[in-house]
Image (cartoon, grey):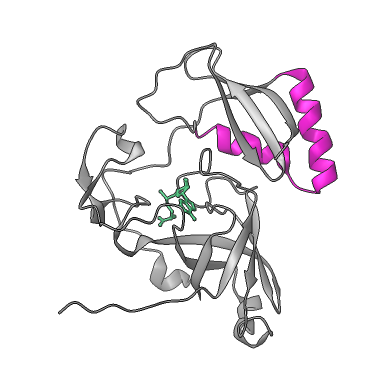
């Protein structure tokens, strides 16, 4: 039997992450990563979120809308395993997957009738959200759970700032009223490069957070230095 079902978003996320590169690989890794789930009709009148003020965290079910593929992959190469080891898609949290559905537990900062204010997100700007459910600690925390492929959070690497870059980040943080310095540090400390890429001190990397472009390099292996934080031109 070949049945299809259609789903439609209950809202869209306005996120600090404007491109996929440098988004943490799971939620909660960057608590300063903030965004807003803007609900669409008929979910935007307040009834659907009534009671959520009793909840600290929510599950978001969403579409990896920038990774959708017509033909499902059975094996993927998770960046976590260095990008060169294939694994069954159901053993990973890869974005390329059947039906393109992602799930994240995120912190619920504030509830308004037509929007949810979130932090600790790992979602790209514009992500369509299919459903929201309360996190239920007694059922969702499984003390004996294990995952031998991803036993602990990724190791962090130190993030250093050029003098000008830190001042630039502070100025933009004030303008945006966002914890931008913390956001940059938390995301870059995860080392966004694919694991197989060797450090080259003269190679520069960049990503866009909110409306600023952040550029950095690796002066030596295992160390990041932020070079500049400037208003994006696009
Ligand atoms: N926590 C989710 C899960 O387990 O289903 C997402 C895990 S996935 C490995 C996280 C990555 O998805 C992020 O680093 C980002 O690059 C990517 N991503 C986030 N939102 C996306 C979107 N809307 N479309 C495509 N890729 C997205």
The N terminus, quarter of image = bottom left
Magenta stretch? 162-190
The C terminus, quarter of image = top right
Quadrant of the rendered image containing residue 202: top right
Quadrant of the rendered image containing residue 53: bottom right
State the residue at coordinates (65%, 49%): 16
Whether residue 134 is visible to the viewer of this picture, yes or no, is no
On screen, residue 169 above or below 24? above
State the residue at coordinates (38%, 42%): 152
On screen, residue 102 above or below 184? below
Q: Position of residue 153 (x, y in %)?
A: 43, 41
Whether residue 149 is visible to the viewer of this picture, yes or no, is yes
Asked whether 177 falls inside the magenta stretch, the response is yes
Q: Position of residue 4 (x, y in %)?
A: 28, 77
Quadrant of the rendered image containing residue 39: bottom right
Q: Main secondary structure of the magenta part?
A: helix
> How many callouts does the rendering have?
0
Asked whether 88 falls inside the magenta stretch, the response is no
Q: Nearer the viewer, residue 165 or 124?
A: 124
Q: Nearer the viewer, residue 56 or 85?
A: 85
Q: Is residue 207 left or right of residue 102?
A: right
Q: Residue furthest left?
A: 1
Q: Position of residue 15 (x, y in %)?
A: 63, 54
State the residue at coordinates (75%, 31%): 230
Q: Nearer the viewer, residue 111 or 9?
A: 9
Q: Position of residue 24 (x, y in %)?
A: 50, 43
Q: Nearer the viewer, residue 213 or 150?
A: 213
State the residue at coordinates (30%, 34%): 83
On screen, residue 195 above or below 45? above
On screen, residue 106 above or below 24? below
């Amino acid at each position: 039997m070949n049945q299809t079902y259609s789903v439609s978003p209950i809202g869209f996320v306005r996120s600090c992450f404007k491109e996929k590169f440098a988004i943490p690989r799971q939620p909660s890794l960057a608590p300063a990563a903030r965004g807003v789930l803007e609900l669409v009709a008929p979910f935007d009148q307040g009834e659907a979120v009534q009671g959520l003020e009793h909840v600290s965290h929510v599950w978001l079910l969403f579409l990896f809308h920038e990774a959708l593929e017509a033909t499902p992959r059975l094996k993927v190469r998770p960046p976590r395993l260095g990008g060169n080891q294939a694994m069954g898609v159901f053993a990973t949290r890869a974005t390329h997957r059947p039906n393109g559905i992602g799930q994240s537990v995120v912190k619920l900062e504030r509830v308004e009738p037509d929007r949810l204010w979130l932090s600790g997100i790992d979602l790209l700007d514009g992500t369509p959200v299919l459903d929201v459910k309360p996190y239920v600690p007694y059922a969702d925390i499984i003390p004996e759970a294990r995952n031998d492929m991803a036993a602990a959070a990724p190791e962090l690497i130190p993030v250093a700032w050029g003098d000008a870059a830190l001042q630039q980040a502070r100025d933009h943080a004030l303008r945006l009223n966002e914890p931008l310095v913390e956001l940059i540090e938390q995301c870059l400390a995860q080392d966004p490069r694919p694991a197989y890429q060797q450090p080259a001190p003269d190679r520069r990397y960049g990503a866009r957070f909110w409306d600023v472009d952040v550029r950095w390099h690796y002066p030596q292996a295992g160390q990041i230095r932020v070079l500049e934080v400037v208003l994006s031109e696009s």
